[in-house]
């Protein structure tokens, strides 16, 4: 049993493709975060200018204090929206990286099973038990990996639901405060 140049080339190509997929996912996430940050900084700057102008135009201290209180709620809402956007990008990037990892694990498993099949054809008599044990361990590992992936996806979905619930709670509090 030996490794052919074509197999080495295929493995190198697969590794390079995986590396490029990870780099693309990371760059896309970085690009989205940069856009979110630039938008947040611009918005904060524009808000601070508008708030300063409003405070300068206040006729008395009571109006200035009232204005400052009014500035807080939009700032909280924007901070929450910013956090939600960053969380969304992080979740999306994590999903993309998980897809790459799942694909690589599937390829590795396929190659390993193929190797085991080749070895079993040339294996001495009595080694069937050892090969069966290795295949059983591989199946158990795959099952554990699948369960871990499912749990991670469920945790991500729960966190996403919690972020949405928190957003709605803050918005509800803001509406109640405005109504009062």
Image: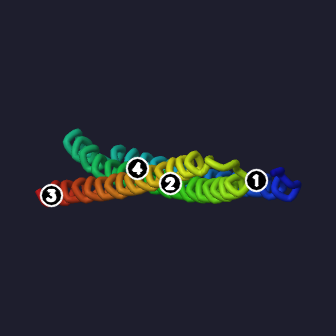
Whole-percent x, y for residue 62 in the image = 19, 42
Which element is circle 2 on?
A: helix
Which element is circle 1 on?
A: helix
Residue 5 falls in which quadrant of the image? Answer: bottom right
Query: From the viewer's perspective, is the residue at label 1 or at label 2 nearer?
Result: 2
Whole-percent x, y for residue 1 in the image = 81, 51
Q: Badge 2, how many Cα within 10 Å: few under 14, some, many 20+?
A: few
Query: From the viewer's perspective, is the residue at label 3 or at label 2 nearer?
Result: 2
Whole-percent x, y for residue 74 in the image = 32, 53
| Mark sitting on residue 176 | 3
Q: Badge 1, how many Cα within 10 Å: few under 14, some, many 20+?
A: few
Q: Which residue is mark 1?
A: 16
Q: Which residue is mark 4?
A: 83
3 or 4: tag closer to the N-terminus: 4
- Image quadrant occupied by the C terminus: bottom left
Q: CA distance from mark 4 to mark 1?
A: 34 Å
Q: CA distance from mark 2 to mark 4?
A: 40 Å
Q: Residue furthest front?
A: 125
Q: Are marks 3 and 1 in contact (CB under 8 Å)?
A: no
Query: From the viewer's perspective, is the residue at label 3 or at label 1 nearer?
Result: 1
Q: Are marks 2 and 4 in contact (CB under 8 Å)?
A: no
Q: Residue furthest left?
A: 180
2 or 4: tag closer to the N-terminus: 4
State the residue at coordinates (44%, 50%). 144
| Mark sitting on residue 113 | none
1 or 2: tag closer to the N-terminus: 1
């Amino acid at each position: 049993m030996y490794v052919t140049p074509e197999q080495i080339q295929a493995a190198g190509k697969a590794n390079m493709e995986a590396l490029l997929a990870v780099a693309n996912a990371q760059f896309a996430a970085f690009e989205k975060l940069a856009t979110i940050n630039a938008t947040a900084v611009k918005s904060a700057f524009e808000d601070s200018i508008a708030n300063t102008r409003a405070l300068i135009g206040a006729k008395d201290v009571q109006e200035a204090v009232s204005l400052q209180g009014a500035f807080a709620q939009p700032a909280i809402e924007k901070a929450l929206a910013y956090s939600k956007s960053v969380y969304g990008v992080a979740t999306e990037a994590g999903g993309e990286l998980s897809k790459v990892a799942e694909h690589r694990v599937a390829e590795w498993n396929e190659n390993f099973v193929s190797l085991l099949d080749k070895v079993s054809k040339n294996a001495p008599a009595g080694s069937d038990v050892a090969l069966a044990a290795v295949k059983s361990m591989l199946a158990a590992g795959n099952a554990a990996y699948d369960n871990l992936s499912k749990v991670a996806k469920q945790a991500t979905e729960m966190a996403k639901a919690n972020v949405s619930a928190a957003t709605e709670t803050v918005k509800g509090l803001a509406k109640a405060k405005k109504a009062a």
